[in-house]
Image (cartoon, coloured by chain):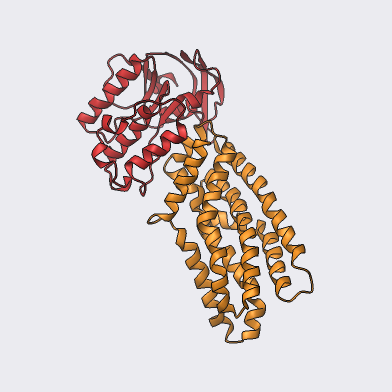
Chain colours: A red, B orange
Amino acid sequence: MRLEASDLACIRGGREVFSRLGFAVAGGEALVVTGRNGAGKSSLLRMIAGLVQVAAGKLALTGGNYELPLAEQAHYLGHQDALKPSLSVQENLDFWVRYLGTSAGTPDALTTVGLHRVAGLPAGYLSAGQRRRLSIARLIAVKRPIWLLDEPTSALDSAAQQRLADLMRSHLAGGGMIVAAAHGAIGLETARELSLGAAA
Amino acid sequence: MTALSALFVRDLKLAVRVGGGAGIGVLFFLIVIVLTPFAIGPDLVLLARIGPAILWLGALLASLLTLERLLTADAEDGSLDLILMSGTPLELAVAAKAMAHWLTTGLPLAIATPLFALFMNLDPQASLAIALTLLVGTPALTFIGLLGAALSVTLRRGGLLLTVLVLPLTVPVLIFGVAASNAAMAGPMSFGTPFTILCAMTLVSFVVGTFAAAAALRHGIE
């Protein structure tokens, strides 16, 4: 499985965010996208997720499931948590598992992210880090080969960052791929770096 | 199918829980109806004559009030991104959301109408007829509003734009809804004629509203 981009350009609000961008990620590899604020890290992730139009260039996945478009093989963890404050932690996760689920992943995802004790609590009472962990639970509860993570470590404490790194490593070991936007280290030693400021 | 029923059930749950706003529409409807006799004065004949129109206007404004919740909440918390990414057809997803929205905001208006009609000095038969027209008419308001909600999400503007966009489109529904109600009370037209046209408009709005809203959301992917 291989995700390839060549001559990629992104235009948002009439302004060119980046152009002539090329990269390739294979299964089992991680790519960390870095760059200054406004360099287009989030736009690139949203473009791979199909939420921003490809203005020019090519973006293609080879070797994946041919029947599904790229967006349906990818998990997108954005800045927003996609959680409803009035639903409980368990209900929030169950909804996304039922909505996104085609192939089941880990059944006890809440235990893995350490939220099983607050499963019955409305998500509105969670702290920022706990909300983040609940979003991460979605990634492992539904199995998808591509993870698009926008600042995945934000709001996480060091123990939770460590646990996320472990999850990412096991995802890579299972042949999955990760494209992450980050300012600091995300805890993956093997990750390659794509610097957007320099490319533009 | 699992995905759609999950979305439908989630939206029902969200609406009836604290802060969900399911009761707000009915409350607003009640306030409009209660205020009218104070504004008009205690002229019982006049109240009964304008009753159907006021009930329909109240229901129209009440359903507009809650329309903004239909898509903006999902757009703000990022749920809409995931809904757009999923393999479930967007048309069906927005239709499921609109159905859940109507069940929690439109249907209560129709159910409350026979009671609220007492304020307007309407006899039971007339109030049941108005409730029936609202029962088939409010889905049209919701599905027309769905288009407005989708547009205001894509344009990233707030609820006022939605009101301005949606209100003109609801004029035909209002005309035939009130016409059917009046026909049931006084005649001379038969109740069936405007009522059937109202039903037809609701059916058309199911199709047009759903597809247009999905198209607007897809276009919003810039």
From the image, which quarter does the C terminus of chain A lie in?
top left
Residue B155 visible in the snapshot: no
Give x and y (percent) for residue A137.
33, 32
Give x and y (percent) for residue B72.
48, 48
Give x and y (percent) for residue B54.
61, 72
Residue farthest toward the front in the current orientation of the protein: B125
Name the residue at 64% across, 42% down: B211
Q: Nearer the viewer, residue A146 or A36?
A: A146
Give the vertical position of B162 relative to B212 (above or below).
below
Residue B127 visible in the snapshot: yes
Q: Is residue B177 left or right of residue A137?
A: right
Q: Is residue A118 left or right of residue B9?
A: left
Give the vertical position of B26 relative to B144 (above or below).
below
Name the residue at 63% across, 47% down: B209
Q: Is residue B74 left or right of residue B42?
A: left
Give the vertical position of A199 relative to B1 (above or below).
above
Residue farthest toward the left in the current orientation of the protein: A159
Quarter occupied by residue B139: bottom right
Q: Nearer the viewer, residue B69 or B191?
A: B191
Quarter occupied by residue A172: top left
Quarter occupied by residue B44: bottom right
Q: Nearer the viewer, residue A195 or A114?
A: A114
Count the marks.
0
Give x and y (percent) for residue B154.
54, 43
Q: Nearer the viewer, residue A119 or A164?
A: A119
Name the residue at 50% across, 65% down: B26
Residue farthest toward the bottom in the current orientation of the protein: B42
